[in-house]
Image (cartoon, rainbow, N blue to C red):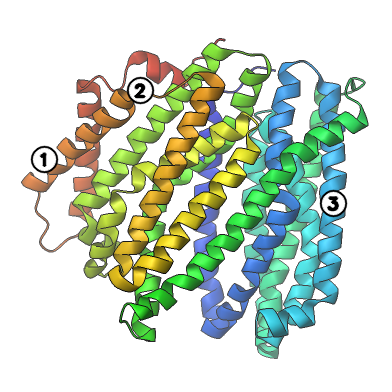
Amino acid sequence: MSRKTIITGTLILTTSNLITKCMGFFNRIFLSNTIGAEGIGLYQLILPIYGLAWSITSAGFTTTISSLTAQEHIRGQNGNIGRIVKQSVYLSLGISLLISMLLFFGAEKTATFLLKDSRTAHPLQLLAFAIPFMAIGSCLRGFFLGMQETMIPALSQVLEQAVRILTIYFLAGIFVPLGLTYACTAAVAGIFFGELLSCLFTVFNYYHFKRKHRFIRRPALSSVAAFSMIISMAAPLSASRISSSLLATMENLLIPRQLQLHGQNTAQALSTYGELTGMAMPLVLLPSACLMAASVSLVPEISEASAVKQDTRIHKTVSATFLFTAIIGFGAAALFAVFPREICYIVYNRPALGQVLFPLAFLCPFIYAQTTLHGLINGLGEQFFLFWNNIVSSLISIAVIWFFMPAYGIAAFLGGWFLSLLFTVISALYLLWLRTGAFPSLYNCFLKPMLAGAAAGLLIKYFIRISDPSKLLFLGSIIGMGLLYLFFLFLLGCLSKKDMNILFGKKIKG
């Protein structure tokens, strides 16, 4: 089987991410029109429980299987892959069944004491049945990602979202008239059937793939050794996801409270918090969709190269992907810094929100670099590093919010986020250098993209002044700025033919 290029897998996963995000957006519109704001509120209460269940049962196993599959495949030990996948599925399924039982029988207490709304009890009980299917599907998606067969995981995500929409569409007319509890249950039914059919689709393709490629070799790896490898990688990954989720929740609860200590009343604090986290931050994070896909694709790529000690391949992969990240990061930073008011006017019809978006623009290169670095480090099997790195990073942000937000308001949050990102990027780059000897060129990956982005942004800002922004003029401005940005990148020698070959398909030899 020929090795897929990073960019191919990234493009497939990025496309599926964008499709599912668009489908999810229209699904949310349909839900809001069907079950109303209060019904959406009940549904939103349940989603953190769903996310936590995924962190416990699935998140660590997906990356673990992806990395170990790539590692064993490059060594020609396909029999080991079957043992690793089977044991991972059994472990994940066992944990998910335990979580499902706890959630099903503890739904009343969870709804009453944790979510503070008893109407979520029945939807939580239905959600419990979706967790085992989510676990199995996530494990097998990890296998396909490790084999660099990204089409199956991509299609399973699209299928899951499509089934959710269709389920809610057909059940809404029956359940919504019965009250909000049943309306919310119909929405959760979409999650259940989505996970069920996505799981069945992935299982079918897994067995078909095994038969087609004759993965029937006897494993050289013992059951105990396979179990040890899985646990040593999955445990810190899962712990990292769970701790990150809990710390992020703590951070989100602190922000409105500390804004009130800054002098805002409750309504103002919630409004500022909503503008920052619900409106401005999603815009900043939107261009990172392709980098998240690249981060997933990097895990098997680096795992393969590391397993057979192909240092040259690792160096080239690190350089090319970090350059790709820097180009997107500084391009996005320039766009959000030059057109913050215009973007917020076009998207939200609120040009004043540009005051919140503008400072976030300067964090883009660090946000995107963090995403790529985590993919590289996952591929090297440094899960314990990521666990402690995420904890320290979150604690830095929480400490700044706690001590400085009462005095400096939202500026303290931005400062804390910057410090946490800076810590993450520097420490990750240091570890990457220690493990591989690879270090991205700061001249090519920092200075040149920054100069190109600044030059393109200043020229567009000088020649095009949008006093009353229209979508057509704004679109033309973005295209013009993008072309100028690429021109300056080539002019400065930031992009070379060698880089383009690595990024767009030439096989990296070790």
Residue 4: x and y in percent read 60, 23
Q: Earlier in the sequence, mark 3 or mark 2?
A: 3
Rendered location of residue 194, percent (x, y): 71, 59
The residue nearer to you, when weighing 212 against 414, is 414
Residue placed under numbered mark 2 in the picture: 441
Amino acid type shown at disc 3? Leu
Left or right side of 417 for 14 = right
Q: Residue at x 83, y 44 (%)?
A: 89
Say which label, 2 or 1, has the lower sequence index. Answer: 2
Q: Nearer the viewer, mark 2 or mark 1?
A: 2
Depth check: give the residue in front, 303 or 399: 399
Using the rendered image of the protein, determine whether residue 141 is visible from the camera's viewpoint: no
* Amino acid type shown at disc 1: Leu
Which type of secondary structure does the marked residue at label 3 adopt? helix
Name the quadrant of the N terminus. Answer: top right
Query: How many residues crowd mark 3 within 10 Å: few (<14), some (14–19), many (20+)?
Result: many
Can you identify the residue that label 1 sits on?
Answer: 459
